[in-house]
């Protein structure tokens, strides 16, 4: 899987912001856009991660060490994905959460891109953008670790 940023890169700030952020449970209405439309809306790094399932280099994401209170939204469509109260320090180099804001707001999909490993990919339910992966080594109360790419998220303080 290609890395979205060079290994010595500084964190890339999130610049895309259409001003639309929905703090709602997903209503089932999908947002479908062509690759050319997404390329106009997203930075090259965001496009690689959100639309081509690339992965940020660990410890380079702008939101990895964010400890402010607020909501994390899909950087592509603005659907609420995680609350800061569910964020924890996983030591992995990516923002990690133990649960989504609403289970309906994320989609799980089997990922076999690494031949010897089956993982669970996490997609935004509205636009089906790649956000990251979920693992079963997280803290209680869920035991899950949603390991997300910073560039796939937009943070808004509450």
Image (cartoon, rainbow, N blue to C red):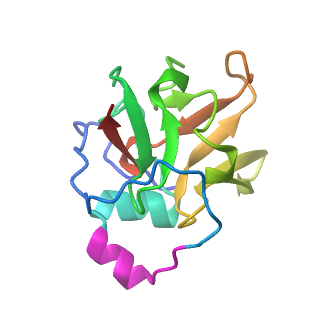
Position above or below: 76 against 94:
below
Report if residue 61 is visible in the image: no
Extent of the magenta region: 31-41
Position of residue 146 measured from the top left corner of the image (x, y, whole percent) = 61, 35
Residue at 74% from the left image edge and 22% from the top image edge: 143
In screen coordinates, is 34 left or right of 45? right
Position of residue 7 measured from the top left corner of the image (x, y, whole percent) = 33, 39
Report if residue 4 is visible in the image: yes
Position of residue 104 measured from the top left corner of the image (x, y, whole percent) = 68, 52
Between 12 and 103, the one lying in front of the other is 103
Between 81 and 56, the one lying in front of the other is 81
Q: Quadrant of the C terminus?
A: top left
Q: How many marks?
A: 0
Q: Quadrant of the N terminus?
A: bottom right
Q: Is residue 53 magenta?
A: no
Q: Is residue 36 magenta?
A: yes
Position of residue 40 measured from the top left corner of the image (x, y, whole percent) = 27, 76
Position above or below: 123 against 31:
above
Residue at 53% from the left image edge and 29% from the top image edge: 96
Position above or below: 29 against 18:
below
Residue at 29% from the left image edge and 71% from the top image edge: 41
The dominant secondary structure in magenta is helix
Position above or below: 34 against 116:
below
């Amino acid at each position: 899987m290609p890395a979205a940023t060079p290994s010595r890169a500084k964190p890339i700030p999130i610049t895309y912001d259409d001003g639309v952020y929905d703090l709602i449970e997903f209503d089932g209405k999908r947002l479908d856009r062509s690759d050319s439309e997404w390329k106009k809306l997203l930075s090259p790094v965001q496009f690689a991660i959100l639309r081509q399932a690339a992965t940020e280099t660990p410890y380079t994401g702008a939101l990895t060490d964010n400890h402010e209170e607020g909501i994390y939204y899909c950087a592509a469509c603005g659907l609420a994905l995680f609350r800061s109260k569910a964020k924890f320090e996983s030591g992995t180099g990516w923002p990690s959460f133990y649960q989504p804001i609403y289970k309906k707001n994320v989609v799980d999909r089997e990922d076999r891109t690494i031949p010897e490993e089956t993982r669970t990919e996490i997609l935004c339910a509205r636009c089906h953008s790649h956000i990251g992966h979920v693992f079963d080594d997280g803290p209680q109360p869920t035991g899950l670790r949603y390991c997300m790419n910073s560039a796939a998220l937009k943070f808004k303080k509450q």
